[in-house]
Amino acid sequence: MGVSRVTDASGIPEALTVAFAEDSVVLIESGVAGREVEIAVLQGRDGSAPRTSSVLGEIVFTGRDFYDFEAKYLGAAGVELALPAKLNSRRSLLRFATPPCKHSRPRSAPVSLESTSS
């Protein structure tokens, strides 16, 4: 799907080659160190405000560098989903309250949380 993870500048040309092989528009994002948590959000009935439809799940890396297309959609090895995600407080959960959304189709995005380790 044209997704690459680059850890230093020397990997950028190859990553761009991979990305431009898929599309003429490329998105480059800086990485964020932390936990990766996901939740499904679906539009409410008859166009009403979105509601959360699942518990928070934590992406646990067991052999992959990042959560790519193959890991998320094709079941590639090296990633597990911990359900529910272990949060260190109810306050952390409130950070995921669903605000009004303008999107008309399901969307998901990873969110980074602070570690729960003591």
Image: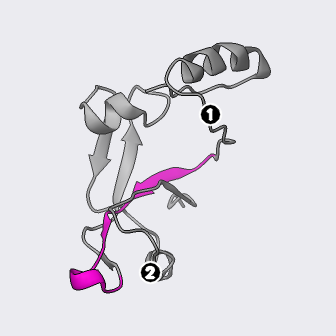
Above or below 115: residue 5: above
Residue 69 position in % (x across, y down): 38, 33
Residue of label 1: 26
Report the residue at 43% width, 79% height from top: 98
- For this view, does 117 lie left or right of residue 32? left
Residue at the extreme front: 24
Amino acid on which disc 1 is placed: Val
| Along the viewing direction, whichever of 58 and 46 lies nearer the viewer | 46
Q: Which amino acid does label 2 sit on?
A: Ala
Of pointers 2 and 1, the one earlier in the residue sequence? 1
Calculate the distance from the C-alpha at mark 2 to the C-alpha at mark 1.
30 Å
Of residues 30 and 113, the one drawn nearer to the viewer in this rendering? 30
* Quadrant of the rendering where the N terminus is positioned: top left
Give residue 25's position: percent from left, percent from top.
Answer: 61, 34
Task: Tell me how the rendering is colored.
Answer: one colour
Q: Which residue is drawn at 48% across and 53% down?
A: 110
**What is the quadrant of residue 8 in the picture?**
top right
Give the extent of the magenta segment.
33-49
Q: Percent from the top left, x then y, of residue 88?
A: 46, 70
Q: Does the magenta stretch include residue 43?
A: yes
Image position of 78 (left or right of 46): right
Pointer 2 and pointer 1: residues touching (CB < 8 Å)? no
Circle number at residue 84: none
Quadrant containing the C terminus is: bottom right
Q: Is mark 1 on a helix, strand or loop?
A: loop
What residue is shown with label 2? 97
Q: Which of 89 and 4 is in front in this view?
A: 4
